[in-house]
Amino acid sequence: MPTRWRLAVCKGKDCRKGRSDDLFRAARAEAARLGIGPDRCVLERGGCYGLCELGPNVVLREPAIGNPDDPLWTGHFRLLHVPGEFHYWRMDVERLRRLLAEHVTGGRPARDLLCPPEKWPGVKP
């Protein structure tokens, strides 16, 4: 059975300035075009991850991580740095299309689109 995912597009003020609203609409359209339904990938808006200078940010997680149905769950507002979590940075529509095609559909992270750990504030690789 293929992995189910939760894909969150940041909705923080700076990411929104970077067109994350357009990015989220594009994600929904591209998922529909690729035939990716909610049984395969749930698309949602994340809170501000505090990574504004790296945005727009998209976080892809396996749904078993944490408690995403809880509106106060910390994973909505920060990276957890756990296996099964992927932070894609400086996203635009073309990069998002690759993420959906390669990672969600193809099962291979788009490694060149992932934010390098040395860019994460307060985390030493």
Image (cartoon, rainbow, N blue to C red):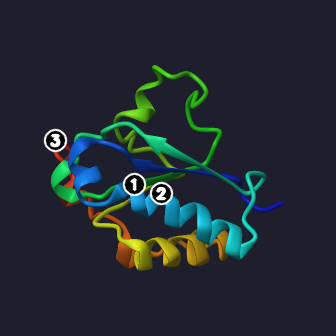
Q: Which residue is mark 2?
A: 24
Q: Residue at x 44, y 33 (%)?
A: 75
Q: Quadrant of residue 50?
A: top left
The span from disc 3 to disc 2 (Cα, nearest Å) is 27 Å
In the rendered image, the vertical position of residue 31 relative to residue 86, given as above or below: below
Name which residue lies at 69% across and 75% down.
33
Circle 1 is placed at which residue position? 21
Earlier residue among tags 3 and 2 = 2
Residue 101 sits above or below residue 4 on the image: below
- Sort mark 1 into few (<14), some (14-19) or many (20+) by Cα contacts within 10 Å: some
Q: Amino acid at mark 1?
A: Asp
Mark 3 residue type: Gly
Labelled disc at residue 122:
3
Specify the quadrant of the image occupied by residue 72. top left
- Residue found at x 38% / y 44%: 81
**Distance between the alpha carbons at the discs numbered 3 and 1:** 27 Å
Q: Could you tell me which secondary element the residue under label 3 belongs to?
A: loop
In whole angstroms, how far apart are the C-alphas of marks 2 and 1?
A: 5 Å
Q: Is residue 108 above or below residue 75?
A: below
